[in-house]
Image (spheres, helix red, strand yellow):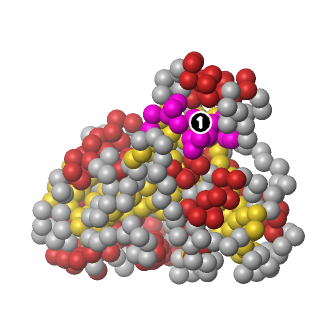
Amino acid sequence: MKIILASKSPRRRELLAHMQVDFEAITSNFDEQLDDTRSPETVAMELALGKALDVAEKYPDALVIGSDTIVTIDGKQLEKARDQQEAHDMLKLLAGKTNLVSTGVAIVRKSDGLQITGVDTTRVMFKPYDEAAVKTYLVTKDWADKAGGYGIQSGAAPLIKEISGHYDTVVGLPTTLLSMMLETAGVVAKPIELTPPVPQNMQYARTKLFIKNREGKKLSVVVEGAPKPGRLAFVMHGLSGRKTEKHIRAMIEAFLENHYTVVSFDTSHTFGESEGTEDYPDATITNYYADLEDVIAWAKEQAWYSEPFVLCGHSLGSISVALFAEKYPERVKALAPISTVVSGHLNVDTYGRETLEKWKKDGIKIMYSRDGKIEKRLKWSHIEDRLKYDLLPKVDRLTMPVILIAGTKDIPTPPVHQQILFDKLPGKKEIHTIAGAEHTFVEPHERAELKKLLKTWIASLD
């Protein structure tokens, strides 16, 4: 199989060669345009895809690899410096701050429509501004043709304090991510380990890629943190949620700050980055749980996977992770079902008789997001499915440590429901309420308390 790297970058060519891949390098003519209105991860993936597609037009049977790197500081995506003065201004802007380097990767084969995308992000912390050091770097011209006006692998290392994440991502090609993507395309390639010229930790390493669930739909999966045996956690969002919601991020950060590898994902029947947004009306506990099983099955094939692991979720995600723990208790180190649905019958009762009767009669219920921007239409079949699930009959299987947290103003999964589950848990357990908090912990201080409670509990697991 012919493999093409759609890049003129000598750094990317060198990294791919070290992965022991036979390839040809062909420069793409794709026009790169940054966009501060969207996330740098999304833009980096789209630019990488654009480069790959441009070359694939001429080589439809080849496997074409595209890549693009974006440096972001204070929400601004930085272009390549056009001259020395612009490079100086960029380095002054970066000084004393942490910038994000996102390198998107795309693999394309036009003949059969194959398209795989992913992105890896590393935090780069610069030292305070030093005029003499910056001038010394600028005269080397190393800044030319580099995103953000610097090259960590060459002369810019003296300006950088440390990095958190994969070094090769900053150089221009995340080989760990690329090896996983190539494997999906049927190509064996080994990631390489480079020694960075600056201190490195992996606490905030972040890789996003797309896998397929049992229905063939793409799921957006993010892997964060440093791989350590015994420190793996899966975090799952609730109904109509996504992995980027602020209360979900609070949960993820609690694990990251305890040096865990954290896997989060968007289900296929929600409003995140996965395929199937149009299928939200058919969202059920059944398909949420199936996506969880599929993500864990995918993770099991990765080098960083370890058992037992911790499961954490919110609302519908909570009952999903708890159902998994009941089915496979030996694989679960600990369980954190936040604002969990305990029983379909208990939860459905919170809607009220009139609402349920109208929902059943109409066959669908129309709801809106808090900001009113998203219309959420959910079929009555969701309720029929929810009534099938109940954690209480097999609660004796939840022998691992469990923490329950809910807000005092939580309506769909109120503290009284959490107490019912708590009282029946057979093992080490904790229960907490957050005063004034609603179901999704809307206020910053509520999320801060959620994170603190969860972080303390995670630390106690060691």
Left or right relative to 308: residue 73: right
Residue at the far right: name it: 58
Q: Residue furthest top?
A: 131
The quadrant the N terminus occupies is bottom right
Quadrant location of the C terminus?
bottom left
Q: Foreground: 303 or 454? A: 303
Compared to residue 156, the image places residue 284 above or below, namely below
Write the residue at 71% across / 61% down.
66
Q: Mark 1 = which residue?
A: 155
In the image shown, does 93 or 415 lie closer to the viewer? 93
Q: Answer whether residue 223 is magenta in the image.
A: no
Up the image or down, 289 lies above or below 255; here it is: below
- Can the viewer see residue 52 in this picture? no
- Secondary structure mostly seen in magenta is loop
Provide residue 141's location: percent of width, then percent of height: 70, 33
In the rendered view, does 13 fall on the left or right side of 228? Answer: right
Amino acid type of the residue that numbered disc 1 sits on in the rendered structure: Gly
- State the residue at coordinates (24%, 53%): 458
Q: Nearer the viewer, residue 275 or 130?
A: 130
Magenta residues (range): 146-162
Residue 158 is inside the magenta segment:
yes
Would you say 430 lies left or right of 93 here? left
Residue 204, given in percent of the width and then of the height, sits at 43, 48
Secondary element under disc 1, as helix, strand or loop, is loop
Q: Residue at x 48, y 59 (%)?
A: 193
Q: Position of residue 88 (x, y in %)?
A: 66, 24
Q: Quadrant of residue 268?
A: bottom right
